Amino acid sequence: MNLSYRVKHVFRRNLVSYKRFVLPTLVVSLVEPLFYLVTFGIGMGAYMGYLGGKPYLEFLVPGVLLSGVMMTSSFECLYDTFLKIVHQKLYDSLIATPISAEDAIAGEIAWGAFRGLVNGVLVLVMAAVMGVRPPSAAGGAFLLLLMALSGVLFGSLAIIVTSFAPTFDFFNYYTELVITPMLFFSGVFFPLDSFPGWMKAFSRLLPLTHAVELSRAVFTGERPPGIAGNLLYLVGLAAVAFFVALRMMKRRLIK
């Protein structure tokens, strides 16, 4: 793997480009999580009452937080990366410089993780305004690290898909068959306790499930059994996905 410090130049290029659209992008990033928090957390929460002795909004926030990171980092490394590769031919220019293909790809994953982190911070601020926040500063710091790790994981998975996607329409398969099931079968909106056994086993394979459980543990201030396993699963899967993404995307860039 030909990774170097030049990854930062790719990230910086994306940051400079992002500054031109930062306000409309932030507004768009706020809409979906705000919709979930208001309609589900407040609207549905009024009928659902309490879950585990706490208001439904407090159950919902940790899941919406990590699902927002997943969606943002994934879409950034799907549609925007495909646009740069196929239509803008940006990567042809990048790898003609001392920046290697691995540097360019890693910089794109880092950018996707950063965008996911920004989205997560916005959700944290909205949740705090609604009265839901981590019980300690240490918990808040861990949440930031968890969001960054999740951004790298989901950004890497998206890069893998982009590495063999022939058209924009191909991403519909990934969003409908992978992203959407994770959103509804990872304990974001309702507990997994009432699921059938086979569905519980399936949900344990989904990385979002482990990220949501870690996030929820931070907000509750508790350490349920298996929480260390959740973290190890995410770290291991992120490492594997990252290096697979580098190899597969390099094959697309250099033929």
Image (tube, grey):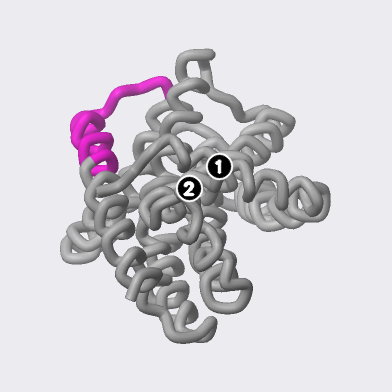
Q: Position of residue 145 (x, y in %)?
A: 44, 29
- What amino acid is at disc 1? His
Does the magenta-highlighted stretch encompass residue 228?
Answer: yes
**What's the magenta region?**
220-235
12 with respect to 203 (left or right) = right
Marks 2 and 1 in Cβ contact (< 8 Å): yes
Q: Secondary structure at mark 1?
A: helix
Location of the C terminus by quadrant is: bottom left
Density class for disc 1 (Cα within 10 Å; few <14, some 14-19, many ≥20) is: some
Q: Which residue is the site of mark 2? A: 107
Residue under the image location 48 percent in, 47 percent down = 107
Residue under the image location 71 percent in, 50 percent down = 18
Residue under the image location 56 percent in, 59 percent down = 76
Density class for disc 2 (Cα within 10 Å; few <14, some 14-19, many ≥20) is: many
**Observer-nearest residue: 116 or 240?**
240
Residue under the image location 46 percent in, 14 percent down = 138
**Observer-nearest residue: 47 or 148?**
148
**Observer-nearest residue: 244 or 152?**
244
209 with respect to 63 (left or right) = left
Q: Position of residue 183 (x, y in %)?
A: 45, 60
Q: Is residue 191 visible?
A: no
Q: Is residue 97 visible?
A: yes
Q: Residues under labels 2 and 1: Cα distance? A: 8 Å
Q: Which residue is the site of mark 1? A: 9
Q: Secondary structure at mark 2?
A: helix
Q: Position of residue 123 (x, y in %)?
A: 64, 40
**Observer-nearest residue: 161 or 186?**
161
